[in-house]
Image (cartoon, rainbow, N blue to C red):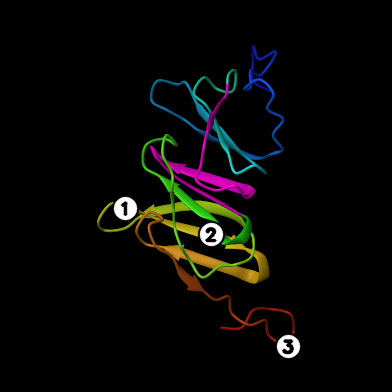
């Protein structure tokens, strides 16, 4: 629980079903916190969770996971939905992939030689998507087939 938080001030009339909460530390020690919703919205708090602001996305399907790398963000959800932002969620762009099922988790990885972070997305049916360009494009990655003894083959 965050110290000093009594009531969250959401938009009047909003009753979002929220998923996952992600925190990002900033140099000035005021954490940015975000969560995502069934309505396709991203909610962001820049005061550690005391007050929240909705950041509209261009989708109306459930968003299940979000991750941040500075002002860049990637959110994933139902029907293969991936949306990205480069301005802290003020504007979102859809990224098209071959995924058609739900995508349940996203994480930024380490930066490549050009300084752009990789992104990994996982979802329904063993879907794994990998991006070398911060989420602008994705390629499908396959898991190894399980061996007869229940381990993983190579």
Could you say which is closer to the camera, residue 152 or residue 39?
39
Q: Residue at x 55, y 56 (%)?
A: 81
Q: In the displayed structure, would residue 13 be above or below residue 142?
A: above
Instruction: State yes or no: discs 3 and 2 in contact (Cβ < 8 Å).
Output: no
Q: Position of residue 125 (x, y in %)?
A: 67, 71
Earlier sequence position, callout 3 versus callout 2: 2
Q: Quadrant of the N terminus?
A: top right
Residue 116 shows which numbered tag? 1
Which badge, 2 or 1, is on the more N-terminal residue? 1
Q: Give SS at disc 1.
A: loop
Q: CA distance from mark 3 to mark 2?
A: 27 Å
Binning the other alpha carbons within 10 Å of mark 1 as few (below 14), some (14 to 19) or many (20 upward) gives some
Residue annotated with mark 2: 121
Tell me the residue at 49%/23% (across/down).
46
- Location of the C terminus (image quadrant): bottom right
Residue extent of the magenta highlight:
52-77
Badge 1 or badge 3: first in the primary sequence:
1
Q: Quadrant of residue 132?
A: bottom left
- Callout 2: SS: strand
Name which quarter of the figure residue 19 lies in: top right
Q: Dot 2, crowdedness within 10 Å: few (<14), some or many (≥20)?
A: many
Q: In the image, is 76 to the left or to the right of 117?
A: right
Instruction: Find out whether residue 83 is within the magenta segment.
Output: no
Provide the residue designation for mark 3: 148
Residue 23: percent from the left, percent from the top? 54, 34
């Amino acid at each position: 629980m965050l110290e000093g938080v009594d009531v969250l001030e959401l938009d009047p009339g909003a009753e979002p079903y929220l998923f996952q909460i992600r925190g990002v530390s900033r140099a000035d020690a005021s954490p940015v916190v975000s969560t995502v919703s069934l309505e396709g919205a991203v909610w962001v708090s820049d005061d550690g969770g005391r007050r929240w602001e909705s950041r509209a996305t261009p989708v109306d399907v459930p968003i299940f996971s979000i991750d941040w790398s500075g002002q860049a963000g990637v959110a994933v959800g139902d029907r293969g939905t991936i949306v990205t932002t480069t301005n802290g969620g003020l504007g979102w762009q859809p990224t098209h992939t071959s995924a058609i099922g739900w995508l349940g988790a996203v994480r930024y990885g380490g930066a490549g030689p050009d300084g752009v972070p990789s992104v990994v997305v996982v979802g329904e049916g063993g879907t794994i998507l990998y991006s070398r360009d911060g989420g602008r494009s994705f390629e499908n990655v396959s898991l190894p087939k399980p061996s007869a003894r229940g381990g993983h083959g190579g």
